[in-house]
Amino acid sequence: MEHLLDIDGVSKRFVKQTTLGERIARALGAGGAPEIVRAVTDVSLTVSRGEVVGLVGESGCGKSTLGRMVAGIYTPSNGRIRFEGAPVAVSRGRRVEKLTTRVQMIHQDPFASLNPRVRVADTVAEGPVAHKLVSQKDADAYVADMLERVGFDAASRRRFPHQFSGGQRQRIAIARALAMKPDLLVLDEPVASLDVSIQAQVLNLFQDLRRDLDLTAIFVSHDLGVVRHVSDRVAIMYLGRIVETAPTRTLYAAPAHPYTKALFESVPKIGAGRGVFRPIAGEIPSPLAPPQGCHFHPRCPSAGPRCGREAPVLKSIGPGQSAACHLHDGGVA
C-alpha cells in the first residue's frame, strides 16, 4: 500500500528548564550538566493510506510525544517525519510552524481541548474559515453538517462546551478535526478520560467515520482491548523506543517481544478462572537516565549480558512482524 506517513529515525529530547539559582551556580562553575529528557529515541514507522496503526505502551513511554510530532505540534530533535514526502512541520527559532492542515490531532482530555468561552459553531468553523477550506458565508451550514456527522442536531452549534457531557465534548473535538478535511488523524487516548459506556459510543463513532470517510489514523492508547478493536496494525513502545510491530491479529495471537508478552499477561481475562496476577517486575526507568543497551533489560526475565551492552535493532521476524530483541537476533549471551 501507499505510504501516507514516513517516520524515519526520529528522536525527541527536552532540556529541563533551569531556575535562576541554577543558572547562577552554573555560571560560577558549581552547577551540573543540564538535565535532558529522552522522550523518543530513534523511532521509525510507516503508515499506509486507509490504515489505522495502534501505538501502545505504559505511561511515559513517549507515545503521546511521537503523536504530537506527527501532528506538527513538536519537531523532532533528530530524524524526519514526512507526510506524502513533505515535512509536517519545521522549527523557526523557538516557534514550530506546521506546514500542512491535512494532519489533525484529537487530544485526550475534551474538558481541556475546547475553549470554554467559544461557542461550538465558532470552535468547529475557525480552522476551515482561516485556511479558506470554506467561506464565511457557508460556514454555518458546514458546521451543522460536521456536527450531524458525529451525532448532533444542528441546534447544538449555538451552545458552549460546558453544556455538554465528556463524551459529547469528545465528539465535538472529532467534528473540529474532521472539519479540516484531514487525510491523517492522530488520536491521543481519545477515550481514556471517559466512562466505559461512553467509550464504546465514541469508538463506534470512530469506526463509522473511518468506514464512511476512508480515514487513516494513528491511535495512541494504553488500553490493549481498545487498540485490538480499532487497529489494523500495532506498534508497542517502551521508554521511547518501538520494540515490536505487527498486524493486530498476529500480535495478539503470537507476541514476540518479552515486553509485549508481559503486557498481555497483565490483562485480566474473562473465563480464565482464578489465577495469580503477575505484574511486570520493577518500575519503568526514568527517561532522564535510560539504561544502556536494551531499555527493557532491567525488567526482562529473559535478559542476558548482551542486553545490557547492545541496543537491539527492530528487525523482521515474520510476515509483517518486527521485534527489537536479541532473542530473535543471535541470542542474549
Image: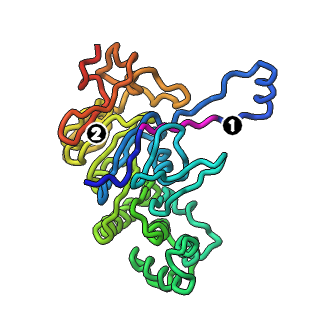
Query: What range is drawn magenta here?
Result: 9-15
Crowding near the residue tagged with mark 1, few <14, some 14–19, many ≥20 C-alpha atoms within 10 Å: few
* Labels 1 and 2 touching (C-beta < 8 A): no
Q: Is residue 295 left or right of residue 33?
A: left
The residue that mark 1 highlights is 17
Question: Where residue 264 is drawn, which disc sits there?
Answer: 2
State the residue at coordinates (53%, 82%): 139
Residue 267 coordinates in the image, percent (x, y): 30, 42
State the residue at coordinates (50%, 81%): 156
Distance from label 1 to label 2 (Cα)? 37 Å
Disc on the earlier residue, 1 or 2 = 1
Q: Is residue 12 magenta?
A: yes
Q: Is residue 5 left or right of residue 327?
A: right
Residue 129 coordinates in the image, percent (x, y): 56, 75
Crowding near the residue tagged with mark 2, few <14, some 14–19, many ≥20 C-alpha atoms within 10 Å: few
Which amino acid type is shown beneath numbered disc 2?
Answer: Phe
Q: Nearer the viewer, residue 211 or 265?
A: 211
Residue 135 coordinates in the image, percent (x, y): 54, 81
For the stretch drawn in magenta, the main secondary structure is strand
Q: Nearer the viewer, residue 239 or 276?
A: 239
Disc 1 on helix, strand or loop?
A: loop
Q: Is residue 220 left or right of residue 98?
A: left
Q: Is residue 170 magenta?
A: no
